[in-house]
Image (tube, rainbow, N blue to C red):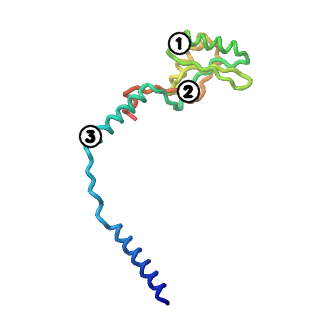
Amino acid sequence: MNKQNRIWIFASMLMISTSGWAQFAKSPNVIRDKRIDKLVDKQIELNQQALRGRTQLEPGFRIVVISTSSRDKATEVKAQLMKSYPEQKSYLLFQSPYFKVQFGNYKTYAEADAMKKELQLVYSDALMITPAQIEVRYEKEGLENQ
């Protein structure tokens, strides 16, 4: 082995050994300003305020009130539902070749069934409860419990 190879081997071993000792050095002492914690807490509060009142999609149930090939008939039924039940949402969907009007956002089948019985007094007995992604609005209390 010539002198140049020995120098390269020695230099390589020296670098490997010193980099290994660097792993065992003491960690740096970090001093954190308490104002940063206040800023983080304020940002969390602002984010929660921004989310308050937003809707999210969750699994639930809707009532199919009508399924027809006439867009005018479906629009008429949707308008009647909106007038009779302004607190509930109704949806006009097109699934070729039918226009369907879905009504409500119910978390449980029992809630949907109770409203279905009420709607059957006005609309036909052909109402169906269908699983759907429903809109759920969360207020302040709902966000904190998540």
Q: Nearer the viewer, mark 2 or mark 3?
A: 3
Name which residue lies at 29% across and 58% down: 28
* Amino acid type at mark 2: Phe
The residue lying toward the viewer, choosing from 32 and 98, is 32
The answer for how far apart the CA atoms under marks 1 and 3 are is 50 Å
Q: Residue 136's spot in the image, x, y percent?
A: 48, 27
Does 94 sit left or right of 25 as displayed?
right
Q: Residue at x 27, y 53 (%)?
A: 30
Nearer to us in this view, 96 or 62: 96
Residue beneath disc 3: 35
Q: In the displayed orientation, state which residue is furthest to the bottom.
A: 1
> Taking 85 as reference, is 29 above or below it?
below
- Picture residue at 60% right of the left edge, 14% below the top: 120
* Rendering coords of residue 91 (x, y %): 60, 20
Q: Earlier in the sequence, mark 1 or mark 2?
A: 2
**Numbered badge on residue 61:** 2
Distance Cα–Cα, label 1 vs label 2: 17 Å
